[in-house]
Amino acid sequence: MENTTKNLIKDISKEIQNARRILFITGAGISADSGLPTYRGIAGLYNNDKLTEENLRIEDCLSYEIFAKKPEITWKYLIQIADNCSKAKPNIAHKFIADLQKNTQKEVFVLTQNIDNLHRLAGIDENHLIEIHGNFQKLHCCNPTCNWQNNFDLYAYLDNFHNTKVLDLPKCPKCCGIARVPVVLYGEMLPENALNKLVNELNSGFDLIIVIGTSCSFPYIYQPVMQAARNNIPTVEINPEQNTTISSVVKYHLQLGAQAAFEEINKNFAF
């Protein structure tokens, strides 16, 4: 490992040690070492312009417009994504963040674009997790006159799907309407509760922001970093890519994958 990289790791580790309130912003790159590709789509299943079996782009299949007309198409690809994610396990980057939150006196929050459940599996407290693109944790009825919702046993659903090879659309037990998970589809607004939580925590202030494995394409991802940099709050980018939206403004840019970076950073901590 080059001296420059070693020095960066030492500096970042010192910033983590000294910080009281830390925001980790994570994208698909943090889960790449868990076996989840960083390709396009919601959690991604397609890495080129190939159309799906329905002769649609994957973004169209995962859109609110298609879900409203043909929910079976959207559910088909949501289940493919969920099945893909269910095979993955948290890596050292997920575990480091969770350990930092659970086993120190620091206030540690995670803003994630991912719906792979790996931060939860690593043990991050739900109150410290902002899943800005939703999750597979619950089901709710799509009928606007029905208020039914419940927890979603995703793993039982996947087991049934594998056993029967039949895509059984979840139905509301109250009105028999189609149910869905709160994953943000293309063309939908971000969840208001997650946005409010993010705004509240940003207003409380952070003294360190660490961005892992995201190109920071969306304003709600890059704006907290830009604002922190303007206010001389330390900012870190961990990403093997050289030029993302925030690369030129962060204080530290560690050009490594998440697992490689946190294997080194973890050596500086005793939880």
Image (cartoon, helix red, strand yellow):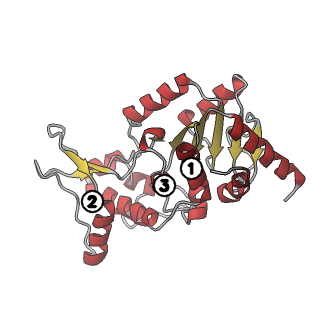
Q: Is residue 270 above or below residue 132?
A: below
Q: Earlier in the sequence, mark 2 or mark 3?
A: 3
Residue 118 location (% of width, % of height): 49, 56
Q: Quadrant of residue 77?
A: bottom left
Q: Position of residue 120 (x, y in %)?
A: 45, 52
Report the residue at 70% width, 40% height from top.
17
- Give the label on residue 113, or none: none
Q: Mark 1 sits on what residue? A: 99
Q: CA distance from mark 2 to mark 1?
A: 39 Å
Q: Which residue is mark 3?
A: 41
Q: Quadrant of residue 158?
A: bottom left
Q: Of callouts 3 and 1, which one flags the residue occurring earlier in the amino acid sequence? A: 3
Residue appearing at x 59%, y 45% in the figure? 100
Q: Secondary structure at mark 2?
A: helix
Q: Which residue is mark 2?
A: 72
Q: Amino acid at mark 1?
A: Asp
Q: Amino acid at mark 3?
A: Gly
> Which residue does the image show at 27% across and 47% down from the upper left?
68
Marks 3 and 1: which is nearer the front?
Answer: 1
